[in-house]
Image (spheres, helix red, strand yellow):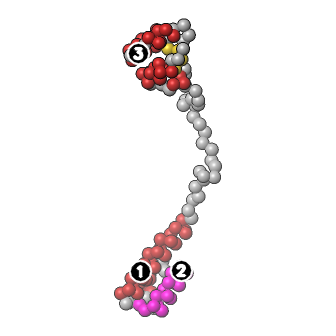
């Protein structure tokens, strides 16, 4: 007996997957007669239609996270981070001084070399040392 359409209807009404719907043998005629949603619900109450339990891992048991190559986060070196921040700031300042005409290209190159060598602690230190250059 073909009950594929009835199984699909039961799955839709009971809000489960097709594979979980089980028709109890001996009740095929009643299932064949069922055409409405209420008929399917009544058959479920009567025990003619049963639903399998879900398979798979239980949610209660927590899964352990494994630390693999994609999960390892490298800590950024703080000294390097500070160097990058101050260097970018000083280079921007040097560029603006060149654009305004306060320094020439030769002096700009000298300032850039000193910035790279970490001679300046801050923008204020750079501006103070401009008179010495």
SS at badge 1: helix
Circle 2 residue: 116
Q: Residue 93 carries which label?
A: 1
Q: Upstream in the sequence, badge 2 or badge 1?
A: 1
Asked if the residue at tag 1 contacts the one at tag 2, i.e. Cβ–Cβ closer than 8 Å, the answer is no
Magenta range:
103-119
Q: Distance between the residues labelled 3 and 1?
A: 81 Å
Dot in front, 3 or 2: 3
Residue 53 x %, y %: 55, 22
Q: How far apart are marks 3 and 2 (CA)?
A: 82 Å
Label 3 neighbourhood size at 10 Å, few (<14), some (14-19), many (20+)? Answer: few
The residue at 45%/91% (across/down) is 105
Q: Residue 35 carries which label?
A: 3
Q: Upstream in the sequence, badge 3 or badge 2?
A: 3
Q: Main secondary structure of the magenta part?
A: helix
The residue at 44%/75% (across/down) is 89
Q: Residue 6 carries which label?
A: none
The residue at 47%/12% (across/down) is 31
SS at badge 2: helix
Total numbered labels: 3
């Amino acid at each position: 007996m073909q009950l594929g359409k009835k199984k699909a209807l039961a799955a839709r009404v009971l809000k489960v997957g097709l594979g979980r719907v089980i028709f109890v043998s001996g009740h095929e005629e009643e299932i064949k007669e069922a055409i409405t949603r209420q008929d399917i619900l009544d058959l479920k109450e009567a025990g003619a239609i049963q639903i399998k339990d879900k398979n798979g891992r239980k949610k209660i048991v927590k899964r352990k996270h494994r630390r693999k190559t994609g999960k390892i986060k490298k800590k950024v070196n703080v000294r390097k981070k500070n160097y990058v921040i101050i260097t970018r700031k000083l280079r921007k300042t040097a560029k603006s001084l060149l654009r305004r005409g306060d320094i020439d290209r030769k002096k700009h190159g000298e300032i850039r070399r000193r910035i790279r060598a970490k001679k300046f602690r801050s923008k204020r230190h750079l501006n103070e040392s401009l008179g010495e250059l």
